[in-house]
Image: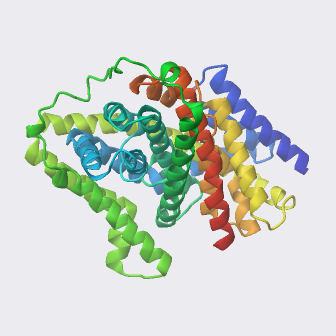
Amino acid sequence: MSDIVVFANTAITIVGVVVLILKAKVSPAIALVVGALYLGLVCGLGPEQTLTSITTGFGDLMAEVGLLIAFGVLLGSLMTELGAIEKLVALLVRAFGPRALPYAFGGTVGTVLQSIFADALLVITAPLASRLSRRIGPHGVARMCAAMALGIEVGLVFVLPGVGAVALAGVMNLSFGTMFVFGVIVAVFTIVTTLALFTALAKRGLWNPELDETTEAPVVEDTERPDDRDERSLPRLRFSLAPLALALALIAVGAIADMLGVTSPVIDLLGNPVVALLLGLIGALVVARVTLPADRSATAFRRGFHDSGQILILTGVGGSLAQTVKDIGLGEVLKGYFSTSTVLPLLLVWLVAAVLHVAIGSVVLASITAAGVLGPVMPLLGIDPVFVALAAGAGSLFAIHATSNTFWLLQTLLPQTTRGALKSVTLTVSCASVIAMVPIQLLALVF
């Protein structure tokens, strides 16, 4: 089959998936499977091999990331019930002054708190960010709104166990330790640099408090997450946060040991992200059983299972499309069109993810689709797959706008108008999408 036919059918598949989602209002999970089915059949795989590719891609990815996503979301749900987030933010307020607080807040949301499902994390932390924004001086609202958006979105695609980062690592068959280390580096650089840029622009007239801020306090309409809990009934921060801190510490140790070539049965076991999150989950459950009524723990688990189900299905069918793309030989076809330079191939990954996100509005779906389509060719060019995953994640952050549920949550839960959200969310996260490519390209050249 000619290269042009392979390219054309791959493009038709991507466009078709977008049309099914946007125009026909088909579920993304169904649209991705239909796209994979079409691509396999028209590119000569045949019915049997096409179905094998779809099921193999789904199964292999679930085997890689299924437990990690489930344990991460359940751990985050228990952390929410234990009040760990509110107490951690209170600690940040005491430890950092007004000038540094937005950086600390955005960095914490984008790294430490990524085990918590994004919508739940936003609902819990946005009211805290809203209250703090009025207490940190000029442009406090602008800075906290931007910090909130950056922490949620950047952490989602770069930092394990963020759902996007886990899905990307699974699609690219990456070591979770490698993804964790490089993802944290890119995320912290991106959040701090972008927030500094936004702060400078806000001070020079980008942000107009009269037009970009609201005067009334945002209302959180989420009865499942009790905001009126008696703080005295919740455990102290060191107890409520200890399970999450343990899990992240074990993942970090395992990642560093893997990069240094240190092998040990104990480190290999405890440093495995699945085992680390399982231990954190067990620890959180013990703390919850000791300090909270039994029904509160059960409620947290029900919420976690509900949140993780939709993530698992969407991630799995993304793996189906990626496997089909690999089996039709797109990687070998693309190989002949690139030099050994890392710059242009990674920029292409970024561009495809950005275009998909603008069309679909889903960060996770755009990133894993771009990585799945272009990932197979990158090892042939000598590019480490981790940078493909990071570039896809960076591209998927571009132009978060009105098609995104997160955009409207950030607008309504924070003291900003829609005009303000276009600046603190759309503009700022789009800048982060571009800025993130700087450390990604530099790291790709070094490693």
Q: Quadrant of residue 15?
A: top right
Locate residue 51, reporting x and y percent.
64, 44
Q: Quadrant of residue 425?
A: top right
Question: Can residue 329 be spotted in the picture?
Answer: no
**Residue occupying the point 27% across, 62% down:** 246
Locate residue 407, reporting x and y percent.
51, 28
Above or below residue 286? Residue 415 is: above
Colour setup of the view: rainbow
Locate residue 146, reporting x and y percent.
48, 38
**Residue occupying the point 74% across, 53% down:** 347
Locate residue 92, reporting x and y percent.
29, 49
Q: Nearer the viewer, residue 328 or 289?
A: 289
**Residue occupying the point 58% across, 36% down:** 204
Q: Nearer the viewer, residue 270 or 247?
A: 247
Q: Is residue 158 left or right of residue 446?
A: left
Number of callouts: 0
